[in-house]
Image (cartoon, coloured by chain):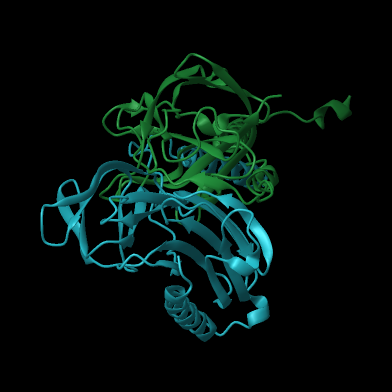
């Protein structure tokens, strides 16, 4: 692995993060008021375990391919991130990105993967953590493999078409199991799957296609973000009317009649005295 | 002797008004008492519900997960709900969302109650296990939760799992909300202390729409 391609990936990443940060800044709340960002690290480069350094500190030791680490809770700011062979000094990093901008109050996946032409890269993706309607689940599929454009199919039907390296397809679906596979764009040539994905209600499932088509190491890595659920719209649980809390209404009538009767009697008493 | 003449005597002309007076007073008092008694009892336990909902989550670590695709969990549905105070022993169905309305899909059969299968299940260690049931229905009459609003603090509620295991809870709160104002997020929370939340309808019934105005919510905590 060389460092050169990584520069480009880092540049793309920085631009993505910067624009992301700018968008967040337009939200006009002052920077110091921003919450930490949640950063998840995804390892999608086959065959090479790494140590992950954040600002020179070994944060995730012996991080294996196909694993997902985090989330790390990081305050907004700039970070130096480096990946080394396990035990190697940070000076001989396999991959390194300096001054990566992490905006406040965001959810980011930092993905170590191969580019379309097979070079290692570290790409940030912003995760959609908007609340889901009750009963729904979010599916995001990201192309992070050394492979051409692909279609992602669910139940045999293409749901995301022509997805290229570094891009994603995303949809909110009914919670439940979908059988997904990946084919070369516009074809029926399957490159991955089919795999059963249990999309849990109120969660976002992010599936990364990783590895290399040429080296036959294509695989999927998946990440789950929980806690995006909403309560149902309501709890309709009766349409008979028998439990109406105003069952006492007739008794008010009886009470009123009683009072009238008593008043009448009182009047007669008083007037009868004369 | 003459003093006897002045003694109070009921004149025939005063008997009817007196009877009317006492009858009227009696009616008014009885009606007042009955009306008061048939009013729903006061709510209780709202602060307890808030405390349960806001219990601190465990501290965050930096975990490493295997990036395997998510697999279906083993089911964790409760099978039966028993409330001795209401002589209730009902079958629990696992239900979700009514796709047409986005509402809780309460089982249509009034003698069954529905467990919200997307939320915490029978063996949950955190969050609100939600079971909703009909107070009544136009088609089937009184429902399993017809008298839910009469539950008192400390009364036991037992949940039975699919494997026959039991979990004991006791009532800590009874609350009533207009459906337009009920904080459902709190009752469908998946974090905070583990608790059992029972929901049904109540309050005035609107014959035009065929709906009750309110929801009645019972919160029960695990019995130690």
Residue A77 vertical placement versus A89 (above, below): below
Residue depicted at x 29% and y 34%: B138
Looking at this view, is B156 or B202 the one in front?
Answer: B156
Residue A261 vertical placement versus A163 (above, below): above
Residue depicted at x 59% and y 59%: A52
Instruction: Describe residue A146's horizontal placement relative to residue A27 as left or right.
Output: left
Looking at this view, is A25 or A264 the one in front?
Answer: A25
| Residue A111 point in image, percent of width and height | 45, 62
Residue depicted at x 59% and y 48%: B63
| Residue A16 point in image, percent of width and height | 44, 78
Apparent colour of chain A: cyan
Q: Is residue A129 visible?
A: no
Quarter-wise, where is residue A194 in the image? top left
| Residue A255 point in image, percent of width and height | 54, 40
Looking at this view, is A21 or A96 the one in front?
Answer: A96
Apparent colour of chain B: green
Residue B9 vertical placement versus A113 (above, below): above
Residue depicted at x 60% and y 53%: A86
Residue positioned most to the left: A187
| Residue A259 point in image, percent of width and height | 57, 43
Q: How many marks?
A: 0
Instruction: Describe residue A135's horizontal placement relative to residue A32 as left or right.
Output: left
Looking at this view, is A105 or B30 the one in front?
Answer: A105
Q: In which quadrant of the rendered image does the N terminus of chain A lie?
A: bottom left
Q: Is residue A55 visible?
A: yes
Instruction: Describe residue A204's horizontal placement relative to residue B174 as left or right.
Output: left
């Amino acid at each position: 692995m060389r460092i050169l391609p990584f520069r480009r990936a880092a540049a793309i990443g920085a631009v993505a993060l910067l624009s992301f940060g700018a968008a967040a800044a337009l939200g006009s709340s002052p920077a110091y008021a921003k919450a930490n960002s949640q950063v998840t690290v995804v390892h999608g480069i086959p065959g090479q375990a790494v140590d992950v350094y954040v600002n020179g500190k070994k944060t995730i030791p012996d991080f294996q391919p196909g694993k997902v680490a985090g989330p790390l809770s990081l305050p907004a700011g700039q970070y130096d991130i480096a990946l080394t062979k396990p035990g190697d000094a940070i000076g001989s990093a396999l991959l390194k990105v300096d001054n990566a901008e992490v905006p406040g109050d965001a959810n980011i996946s930092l993905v170590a993967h191969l580019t379309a032409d097979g070079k290692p890269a570290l790409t940030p993706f912003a995760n959609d953590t908007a609340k889901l309607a009750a009963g729904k689940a979010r599916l995001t599929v990201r192309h992070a493999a050394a492979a051409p454009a692909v279609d992602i199919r669910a139940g045999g039907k293409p749901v995301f078409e022509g997805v290229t390296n570094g891009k994603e397809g995303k949809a909110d679906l009914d919670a439940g199991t979908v059988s997904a596979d990946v084919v070369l764009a516009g074809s029926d040539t399957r490159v991955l799957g089919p795999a059963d994905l249990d999309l849990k209600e109120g969660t976002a499932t992010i599936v990364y296609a990783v590895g290399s088509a040429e080296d036959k190491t294509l695989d999927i890595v998946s990440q789950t973000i929980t806690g995006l659920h909403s309560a149902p719209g309501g709890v309709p649980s009766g349409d008979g009317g028998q439990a109406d809390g105003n069952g006492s209404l007739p008794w008010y009538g009886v009470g009123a009649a009683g009072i009238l009767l008593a008043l009448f009697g009182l009047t007669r008493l008083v007037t009868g005295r004369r | 002797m003459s003093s006897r003449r002045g003694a109070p005597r009921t004149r025939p002309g005063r008997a009817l008004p007196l009877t009317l007076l006492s009858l009227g007073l009696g009616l008014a008092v009885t009606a007042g008492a009955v009306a008061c008694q048939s009013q729903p009892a006061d709510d209780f336990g709202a602060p307890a519900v808030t405390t349960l909902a806001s219990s601190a989550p465990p501290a965050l670590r930096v975990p490493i997960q295997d990036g395997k695709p998510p697999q279906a969990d083993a089911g964790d549905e409760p099978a039966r709900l028993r409330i001795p105070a209401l002589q209730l022993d009902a079958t629990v169905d696992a239900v979700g969302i009514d796709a047409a309305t986005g509402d809780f899909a309460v089982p249509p059969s009034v003698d069954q109650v529905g467990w919200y299968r997307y939320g915490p299940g029978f063996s949950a260690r955190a969050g609100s296990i939600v079971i909703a049931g009909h107070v009544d229905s136009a088609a089937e009459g009184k429902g399993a939760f017809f008298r839910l609003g009469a539950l008192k603090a400390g009364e036991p509620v037992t949940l039975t799992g699919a494997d026959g295991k039991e979990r004991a809870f006791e009532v800590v709160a009874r609350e009533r909300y207009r459906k337009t104002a009920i904080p459902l997020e709190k009752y469908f929370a998946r974090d905070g202390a583990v608790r059992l939340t029972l929901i049904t309808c109540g309050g005035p019934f609107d014959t035009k729409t065929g709906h009750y105005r309110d929801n009645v919510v019972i919160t029960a905590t695990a019995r130690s």
